[in-house]
Image: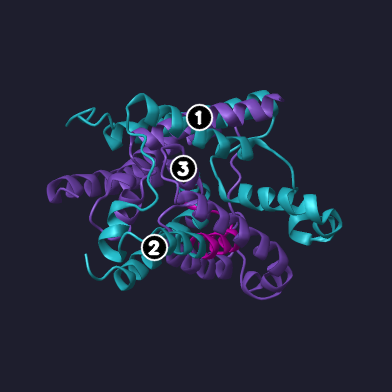
Chain colours: A purple, B cyan
Amino acid sequence: MTTTLWLGLIAGILFGVLLQKGRAVRFDKLVGMIRLRDMTVLKLMLSAILVGMVGIYALFDLNLIAISHNSMNVGGIIVGGVLFGIGWSITGYCPSTAFGALGEGRWDAVFAILGMLAGAAIYAELYPFFKSTVLAWSDFGKIGLPEALGVSPWLIIFVFWVGTIALFSWFEKKKL
Amino acid sequence: MKLKNDDGSWNPYIAGVLLGVLAIVSVFATTQLIGKTEYLGASTTFVRAAGLIEQTIAPGHVAANEYFTKTKVAIDWQFMLVLGIFLGSLISSLSDKSFSSKGVPPMWSKEFGPSIAFRAVAAFVGGLVLILGARMAGGCLSGHMLSGLMKLSVSGFVAAAVFFGFAALAARIIWRKS
């Protein structure tokens, strides 16, 4: 196996351990989050984002890594986001947690994974249609919030930290 | 604040901080060792896996498909990441005895009953719709939200809001009884 594949596998195993230890692969936790009853998964994700954004921008400022944004395709993200949200509320797993759920024995994830494979195959067939319709509406390209707002990334990170810590303390107060 | 619960699970804030560290180390390691910066994500892997499966039946069809060509049907870093998630979760759940062979989640059972067939169909259909959306949007919770927000991508903020907003709305409509 190449270095690339080994790095992926090692990162994946650690990712899987952390998601499982945080109980973020569990259906009841993922659906509990969107039913606004149990914020376990959101606490985990936002904590990871708080730490990750500082590290990523520190490495970027030191010229050690590149930052490549995902495309801000308006039609794709809005229509795709609606479909994602609806599908998520039914299947209860997302692409990474479905494999994690299967790893801890929750085998209904097999059907979620098969559905995702079928959906991916269908998307590949319909891609020319989506490309000329939904994806063609408006595309701002690979933009970051700092450039879009014309401010320092560290200002955004600071505001994000303050907002998220406030959200965390609210979650704890409400025992979510 | 407890670091570890009685059932072996970790405090989600602690697991999250460690996941953040993992994301940083992984971004740095891939850049340094393979010259390509890899961010955590998962949904593209389903396209590659679907392509690999289709290739065994109709290789010409896959080669002629624009999306498969653009995505490059091969086992890559992210593919191994997704397989690793399965292994990591397996190791972790066996080590703290939280592994349990179950086909119907407790919350699902409360609302829709214990039917395995109904749960299987719903999991399949939901998964299908979800991945159509993820590919259209260009990412899932990991790629768009987790990695996108770390990078401060505009798309990450918009996707996180739309994903959560519509999932919460759909959940309100679907889950009525319990």
Q: Earlier in the sequence, mark 3 or mark 1?
A: 1
Report the residue at 38% width, 31% height from top. B93
Q: Name the one closer to the observer, B48 or B27.
A: B48
The x, y position of residue B158, in whole percent, is: 46, 61
- Host chain of mark 1: A
Q: Nearer the viewer, mark 2 or mark 3?
A: 3
Q: Quadrant of residue A136?
A: bottom right
Q: Which residues are magenta?
A: B126-141
Q: Nearer the viewer, mark 3 or mark 1?
A: 3
Q: Which residue is mark 1?
A: A13
Report the residue at 55% width, 26% height from top. A10
Residue B140 is one of the magenta-drawn residues: yes
SS label for mark 2: helix
Q: Quadrant of residue A119?
A: bottom right
SS label for mark 1: helix
Q: Do the residues indicated by labels 3 and 1 lie within the same chain of the protein? A: yes
Q: Which residue is mark 2?
A: A89
Residue B31 vs A50, above or below: the answer is above
Q: Disc number at residue A102?
A: 3
The x, y position of residue A168, in whole percent, is: 23, 45
Q: CA distance from mark 2 to mark 1?
A: 26 Å
Q: CA distance from mark 3 to mark 1?
A: 14 Å
Instruction: Kindly identify the amino acid type of the residue bearing the numbered disc 2.
Output: Ser
Residue A49 vs A93, above or below: the answer is above
